[in-house]
Amino acid sequence: MTPLPPFTVIEPEIGHTLAKVLRSRLHESLPSWADVKATIERRRVTINGSVCADPARRLKEGDVIELLAKPAALPRNATVESLVIRHLDDHVVVIEKPSGVSSVRHPAELEWSEERKRLEPTLHDLAQWAIAAKLNRSAKGLPPLRIVHRLDKETSGLLVFARSVLAERELGRQFRQHTVVRRYLAVITGHVTPRTIRSTLIRDRGDGRRGSTKQPDITGKDAITHVEIEERLPKHTLLSCKLETGRTHQIRIHLAEAGHPVCGEKVYTKNSAGETLPNTPAPRLALHATELGFEHPVTGEHLHWTMPLPPDLAKFVERLRT
């Protein structure tokens, strides 16, 4: 099969299916629809770094498509048995999210069968199956999990789902009012000083990526990240990043635009001037949601959890110390 380097979806391809775009670009090496469909379903295609096994997935502007040399392996930690539940009651569940698992399913995949979902589970799926196992009940008989926030696929750490309509509404209010405690650990190249980063984030900064704008006539969303030093390493820094707002990819964008992308970053690699920055390879994106706290949506009790760096990032930091 002819190699296909990563490419960004362009205007004529927007809205078309993944299968159609791949066949158009690889018509010589993938001459039939069956070849294209088989290549996708064998986990050989990623969209924005995540495996996509759905040939009918509709593509959006800025999507980055890559054809892998061999099928991607299923995440080893994407199992019910390995999932850690930190808190469970009738209204909320707090989970330790492993890296390599999407928080929620793409809308185009919501109608997948249960069997197909188990081949590519999300944290949303795993959490519901784990709750069912813990309560010795069928997952179909449980109230649906309701999404109130997300973590990027490669980011690990603490995440909460609502288990009732009331919890969804009340947690949503707390997130909107920025009263939820969310702190992340990030490893960056170089050294920085403690600071508060404020910017206006937009969906497309001009290169198909999310980013900040200084143009007053463009409508965006305020984003605020408080950065503290957790540990200075010889050529790197372990940062503590506390979110005041929770915009998509906020920490990754803010640190890259400040000139210090998160180690292992593959998307946000340019500073605010548009210059590509050097970065340190890592086992994966070196970002971890280490702290989560909120008021229980029914009892009002303040709930709070912390989670240390998982083994892969802890070993990475230890290497950087020497």
Image (cartoon, helix red, strand yellow):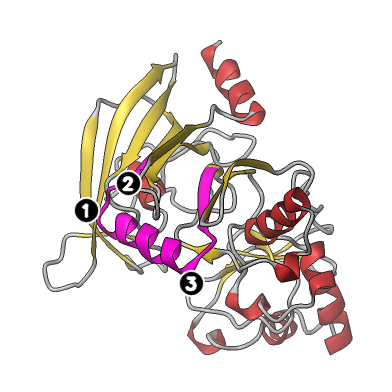
Asked if one can make out residue 3 in the rendered structure from this viewpoint, the answer is: no
The tag earlier along the polypeptide, 3 or 2, is 3
The x and y percentages for residue 19 are 73, 83
Q: What residue is shown at x 65% (from left), y 85% (from top)?
A: 17
Residue in the image at 43% along x and 32% along y: 188
Residue corresponding to mark 1? 199
Give neighbour class at mark 2: few <14, some 14-19, many 20+ (Cα, 10 Å). many
Q: Which of the numbered marks, if any, corresponds to residue 254?
A: 2
In the displayed structure image, the side of residue 287 where residue 107 appears, left or right:
right
- Amino acid at pointer 2: His
Separation of residues labelled 3 and 2 (CA atoms): 20 Å
Quote the CA–CA distance across marks 3 and 1. 22 Å
Say if mark 2 contacts mark 1, CB within 8 Å: yes
User: Which residue is labeled 3 in the image?
Assistant: 62
Q: Residue at x 58, y 35 (%)?
A: 281
Q: Is residue 253 above or below residue 289?
A: below
Q: Label 3 sits on what residue type?
A: Gly
Quadrant containing the N terminus is: bottom right
Question: Split into 4 quadrants, where in the image is the C terminus?
Answer: top right
Q: Which residues are magenta?
A: 158-182
- Residue 104 is marked as none
Q: Secondary structure at mark 1?
A: strand
Q: In the rendering, at what x and y percent does residue 226 appear? A: 26, 37
